[in-house]
Image (cartoon, rainbow, N blue to C red):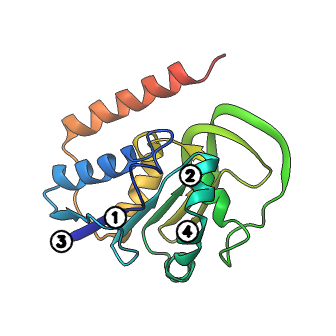
Amino acid sequence: MISVSSFRPELFNRNADQGNILVLTKQLQWRGVSFEMRGEFDINSDFVLIGDSFNAVRREYAAELLELVPGLQARLDQGRPTLLVGSSYEFYLGVLDGLPKPTRSNRVSEFREAKYGRVSAFGYRNTDLEEPDLFVQGAFIGTTLYGPVLAKSPDLLKVLLEELEVEGELSPGFSTRLDLYLEQIKKTSIAD
């Protein structure tokens, strides 16, 4: 059984980042894989999410976020399935060894496709970071792209599912429908 955990989902959900949990668990369900959503945050779960939050929330919970550093560092070192989204990813830049060091520039707010090696992701960027919008080490993923990025980024989802040892493909019907949704999302998100 695959365990799934999210850090304070009621607060770290500024841009519907908890939708990533729904995307992952639906993919597991469609493939007939058992999973459990942990009620309390558990850094040792098979998959861990820390979503985006408002500045005031991050300030309030900074001590708790810093307490997670040893566990997150181990996950990063081992490339375990982890997703840090938006401001939470930015919070850990320069804190976790192996993540890029943060440098700032002009703020960019736009939908875009981000690449890290052969892995790509699509989403909304709203940051003044100069760093790449996507970081991938094994199945440890950090991104400046907000929201349910897994719904719009089949590459990221594939990385996570492979590391979780989830086998099998979706039925052709599901797969075709999801491809069409993704195409429509990209078409309506990016202005020409």
- Which residue is rendered at x = 84% and y = 51% of the image? 104
The disc at residue 120 is none
Q: Amino acid at mark 1?
A: Ser
Q: Does the residue at mark 4 contact the one at mark 3 (Cβ under 8 Å)?
A: no
Q: Earlier in the sequence, mark 2 or mark 1?
A: 1
The kind of residue on which mark 4 rests is Leu
**Residue that carries the numbered disc 1 in the rendered image:** 5
Disc on the earlier residue, 2 or 4:
2
Q: Which mark is residue 65?
A: 4
As drawn, which residue projects farthest toward the top?
Answer: 192
Residue at label 2? 57
Counting residues from the start of the chain, the first of labels 4 and 3 encountered is 3
Determine the residue positioned at 26% across, 69% down. Answer: 3
Residues 160 and 18: in front is: 18
Q: Which residue is mark 3?
A: 1
- Three-letter code for the amino acid on which mark 2 is drawn: Val
Task: Work out whether 112 lies above or below 190.
Answer: below
